Image (cartoon, rainbow, N blue to C red):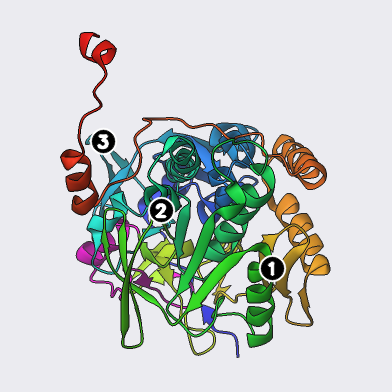
Amino acid sequence: MTAVLSPPVSTPATQQSPHHVVIVGGGFGGLYAAKALGDARIKVTLVDKRNFHLFQPLLYQVATGGLSAGDISSPLRAILSKQKNVRVLMGEVVDINPRRQQIAIKNGETIPYDTLIVATGSSHHYFGRDEWAKIAPGMKTIEDALEVRRRILLAFESAEKEMNPERRKALLTFFVVGGGPTGVELAGAIAELAYETLREDFRTINPTETKIVLLEGMDRVLPPYPPELSVAAEKSLRKLGVEVRTKTLVTEIDGDVVTLKSGDRVEQTQAYTVLWAAGIKASPMGQAIAEKTGAELDRTGRVIVEPDLSVPGYDNIFIAGDLAHYAHQGDKPLPGTAATAMQQGSYLATSIKGRVAGKPTTAFRYKDSGSMAVIGRNEAVANLNFAKFSGFPAWLIWVFVHIYYLIEFDNKLLVMMQWAWHYFTSQRGARLITGNDSIPALSQQVMNEMAEAEPVNNPEMVEA
């Protein structure tokens, strides 16, 4: 039976002026809420620390040179420019005052609200080993993706001029930690980059000798997917040349030395590039909300919400997207996916319009349309609930779904053109190394070896 929720009691502020909805976060949840409120007689303020919306599901393609950052990003002001009741502000929200109904910006400014939607997403989770972040970057932002791209491409460049065969082998070894959709897609993309795109580009090294290892602590990749799709995904990965190691945990990362544990077996191996796709934790706003409202958080920092996505005890504060722990449908929380955030954002817009009009609202209900992950060209898996696909049919579905959900038309067109070019030529046009040109962190052992190495006896260099 669907729960019916009563509208909040009107306040003098809502009676004297247009109801003011403040949305924190311009990701899928926040943006879909803002767009759906565009036709309402409601004042809307969208606050984000970035001035653009990022299509996160395709970040791994930026990280492997398949797409440029601009292909999957859209300016928030441009997206919402025709919605005259929506104001966009660039700023980082750091605190909330429920009693005064205000949020605080990092520069000290405050913004009042009648209704607040917090959709600030999530970040990487290193399970208590945050020091690994500098050695094993993940992918949640454009900067993350560009850093991953820098490390991947720099590894090949460094290997091309490396004379030590063992060090060259380590430079051409890539570890991807985490066998969920992000890890599977990233490992497959690196394999295509090494074995197809870069195959003829170097003279000293052979990129096809690259070793890509996907590590997963569970007994199969894509654990949330049906077992048969996990098997299909692993077969596709192995076909591409990826070494898949399940029931394997990373217990230590010391520069370029990675310690792995599989059962009772512990081993150390050398790899200059370790990429993190093993877990997520909620944004710090979850902790701020918990401190000021008494809301309960789950172990990853998500706010445990009511059936209408509100914070317990506060019927004008709502949580959407990765920050929300919604356990009122099924035996486990909803997945932290773009589809979940989109539906929650649209629901909140409808709910708020109903509440302002004095109408009762119903509880949020998630409609599961399925899940999918791409491994490589013509290789993907898709669970659409009514049917399961793998191989080319799943790949085709994945392509059209991702094109459809890109926000602006020019992004759709650019991505389609890039993918068509890559499909027929195997070329990736965004293979730029930006930032510094230093190789990833070295272990103390390698640093000692380099320090002990005899200097080159070259009079010309000494004179220079």
Per the image, label 1 sits on a secondary structure element best described as helix
Mark 3 surroundings within 10 Å by alpha-carbon count, few (fewer than 14), some (14 through 19), many (20 or more): few
- The relative height of residue 147 versus residue 135 in the rendered view (above or below) is above
Q: Quadrant of the N terminus?
A: bottom right
Of 294 and 123, which appears nearest the observer?
123
Q: Quadrant of the C terminus?
A: top left
Disc 1 and disc 3: Cα gap in Å?
Answer: 55 Å
Residue labelled with disc 2: 170
Per the image, label 3 sits on a secondary structure element best described as loop
Q: Earlier in the sequence, mark 1 or mark 2?
A: 2
* Label number found at residue 239: 1
Mark 1 is on which residue type? Lys
Per the image, label 2 sits on a secondary structure element best described as helix
Residue 356 appears in the figure: no
Mark 2 is on which residue type? Ala
Of 223 and 50, which appears nearest the observer?
223
Q: Residue at x 24, y 34 (%)?
A: 107
Of 422 and 154, which appears nearest the observer?
154
Measuring from the top left, give residue 222's x and y in whole percent.
57, 76
Range of the magenta residues?
Answer: 283-309
**Quadrant of the rendered structure where residue 185 is?**
bottom right
Of 71 and 202, which appears nearest the observer?
202
Disc 3 and disc 2: Cα gap in Å?
Answer: 49 Å
Disc 1 and disc 2: Cα gap in Å?
Answer: 22 Å
Measuring from the top left, give residue 295's x and y in whole percent.
28, 72
* Label number found at residue 109: 3
As drawn, is 95 to the left or to the right of 385? left
